[in-house]
Amino acid sequence: MARDLYEVLGVERTATEDEIKKAFRRRARELHPDVNKAEDAEDKFKELNEAYDVLSDPKKRSAYDRFGTVPGASSGPGGYGGGYVDFDDLFGGGFGMGDLFSSFFGGSASAARAQQRREGRDMAVGLRLTLEEVAAGVNKEIVYDRLAPCPDCGGSGVAEGGSEVTCPDCNGTGRVVTVQRTFLGDMQTAVPCQKCGGTGRTIDNPCPECEGQGRVPDRQRVTVEVPAGIRDGQQLRLSGFGEAGLRGSRAGDLIVTCRIQPNEYFERDGDNLHARANVSMTQAALGAEIELDGIMEDEKVVVRIPEGCQNEQVVRVKGFGMPRFRSDARGDMYVHVNVVIPKKLSKRQRELLEHFAEEMGEEVDQPRGAWQKLKDIFE
């Protein structure tokens, strides 16, 4: 980011969010490699993307205005402040602004193309969550790029005073029939109309911002409500937040796939949780109550260790597992007991254990030598 980012976009430092968006779209149409054949067009378009990535995000822009740089900034959208977002959408992995503009140019009125799809396509992203967030339920902001309804024409594609009319080339059929004379006779071929893109309709005065499509490449921010107890790989569908449709047609949906990160202390098994707890050999032998932290914030779980508990024995605590999806009930916690044997004993402790072993009729280590007895005197 050697050049001034405002200079790259061609805006003043006081530019509003809408002015930054419009400047980016204007400059992107000029610099995109699909339309600009200059040798450095790709590099300039990448530089433009990086500038927009910073200036379109209020937090990144604030940091840039204060320090002249953004720590850890990189090109492309990313769920800033809302957790890691993995882009793996239906247009191909890592779909970004460059690909959106390629799609935009491919569907513009000036380009030759096959029959246009009017409805917007679904998009998909993966949202990374912690187990604690899943237990409590959480709202996450996702930042992603999509073809969104044009703000200037409201998604209609029609400029002020214009209208949508029947295509004069295909008379509204969306197809043009051509006749070729061959030695076998006349052959008819029906192809999508180039003028209307197979839609059968054209605009006599198209919106200059979207070139009559009714949609423009834009950076979208949406808050996803993740319900408590959701499973890894489970999907949430946000209706209308996918690719916008052509000239006001139905938009696609945004499909959010939840990816839950491993937890340091708990292992999830459906709605149940597994945890480990250390107890002393006396607690295991005599029984005890210990306290563990639960999965919920500030939650304490009392675990009753039974008398004669063995190493790796599992103790069940009802109702302290994960919340059941869209329910008030919870699973259980299974505590795996680890009996800890002391590595060093005091003289008194050793004597007590020796007496215990004698009572149990057990053979223990050989009597200690003179050196050990001398050490015991000074303990």
Image (cartoon, helix red, strand yellow):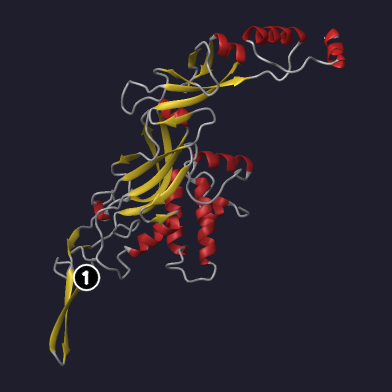
Q: Which part of the image, by quadrant, shows the C terminus?
A: top right
Q: Nearer the viewer, residue 181 or 28?
A: 181
**Horizontal and vertical percent for residue 192?**
22, 70
Task: Classify residue 135 as left or right of residue 250.
Answer: right
Answer above or below: position of 268 versus 164: above
Task: Classify residue 352 as left or right of residue 73.
Answer: right
Q: Nearer the viewer, residue 115 or 129?
A: 129
The outermost residue toward the bottom is 183
Q: Amino acid at mark 1?
A: Cys
Q: Which residue is mark 1?
A: 193
| CA neighbours of label 1 inside 10 A, class few (<14), some (14 to 19), many (20+) | many
Mark yes or no: residue 134 visible.
Answer: yes
Disc 1 is placed on an element classified as loop
Q: Nearer the viewer, residue 128 or 281?
A: 281
**Horizontal and vertical percent for residue 43?**
54, 63
Residue 329 placement: quadrant: top left
**Horizontal and vertical percent for residue 352?**
70, 7
Residue ID at (55%, 49%): 74
Task: Classify residue 250 as left or right of residue 172.
Answer: right
Answer above or below: position of 304 versus 158: above
**Horizontal and vertical percent for residue 11?**
51, 51
Q: Nearer the viewer, residue 301 or 339?
A: 339
Mark yes or no: residue 10 visible.
Answer: no
Residue ID at (50%, 35%): 262
Q: How many marks?
A: 1
Residue ID at (51%, 56%): 48
The outermost residue toward the left is 185
